[in-house]
Amino acid sequence: MPSSMTGFGQAEVSGFHVEIKGVNHRFKDIRVKVPKDMGALEAAIREKVQNSVHRGKVEIVVTALQPEPGLAGTLIDWHLANKAHEQLKAMAETFGGEVTFRDVLAVPGVMVEGRPPSQEDVQPVLEALEAALEDFLSSRAREGEHLCVDIRARIAAIRGMTLSMKDLATTMTSVYKERLHANLSALLAERGTVLDATRLEQEVALLAEKSDITEELVRLEGHIRLLEDTVSQSEGPIGRQADFILQEINREVNTIGSKSQLAQLSRVVIDAKTEIEKIREQVQNIE
């Protein structure tokens, strides 16, 4: 079943939380945020997600959770503290004043709560990523299923409208003949001229040929079948293909509308275009 580009997944393993969000995007855009001391993991995380996602904007955020109260330890970065103290003392000698330990503690990074992330945390992060990715892909699949149910219902509606167009097309010639006969009879009556039946048939045949929509209906039915088959695929990205097929469907419907001389047929064309636009909106969400 095709997947939606919209989804959410999360997981927590050994003090690390991984969150994955996906939204619509024309191309594939993977963004990764990890703790500053775990930058080496960014490439591996990106590759893992890229292999599972074909299209969409996806953001992965890895967060190191704080230990439970009572277990958290306060750690001092003594190297940073000494360096900060030297710089603060130099400023105090220049501008006056005294440096205390509180001034040093106020420097960002000197005191941290708990243990900063390290390479030992690679495996827990990857496990959390695997679980979050599975959750994320499942949510996209569920959303994709809902979208496809709606799309298939609208395709069925368009198929019914196509049958109506076909039925109306069979009456087109007789309607043209009656309309043309009435107009010409009224015009010739004013001039006292008799209507030439042979000439009338020729004009009707010429008009019917210009307004014939048989080819458009045949192509339209073929495009509808192709769209149904595409949406019913068991797996893989279909968004771009479905969007292209919808363009072809819309083109045939527009041509039928331009040839229509019947108000009823024109109304059916408008209804079909409305459904096509609704399908296109849904397809924009599909991977």
Image (cartoon, rainbow, N blue to C red):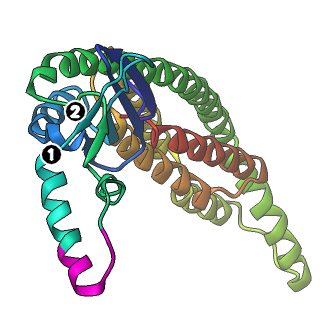
Direction from residue 13 to residue 179 in the image, left or right: right
Image spot of residue 69 (x, y percent): 45, 19
Residue sitting nearer the eye, 180 or 103: 103
Viewport quadrant of the N terminus: top left
Q: Earlier in the sequence, mark 2 or mark 1?
A: 1
Residue 259 falls within the magenta-colored stretch: no
Image spot of residue 39 (x, y percent): 14, 41
Give the residue type that dot 2 points to.
Pro
Per the image, label 2 sits on a secondary structure element best described as: loop
User: What are the residue bounds of the magenta stretch?
Assistant: 90-98
Residue 279, compared with residue 254, is above or below; it is above
Kindly identify which residue carries mark 1: 78
User: What secondary structure is the magenta-colored segment mainly?
Assistant: helix
Q: Nearer the viewer, mark 2 or mark 1?
A: 1
Image spot of residue 101 (x, y percent): 30, 54
Q: Where is residue 153, by image quadrant?
A: top right
- Which residue is found at the position 16% from the left and 22% from the top? 121
Alpha carbon distance from label 2 to label 1: 14 Å
Q: Where is residue 67, by image quadrant?
A: top left
Q: Are marks 2 and 1 in contact (CB under 8 Å)?
A: no
Mark 2 closeness class: few <14, some 14–19, many ≥20 residues within 10 Å: some
Viewport quadrant of the C terminus: top left
Q: Where is residue 141, by image quadrant?
A: top left
Any mark on residue 116, and which?
2
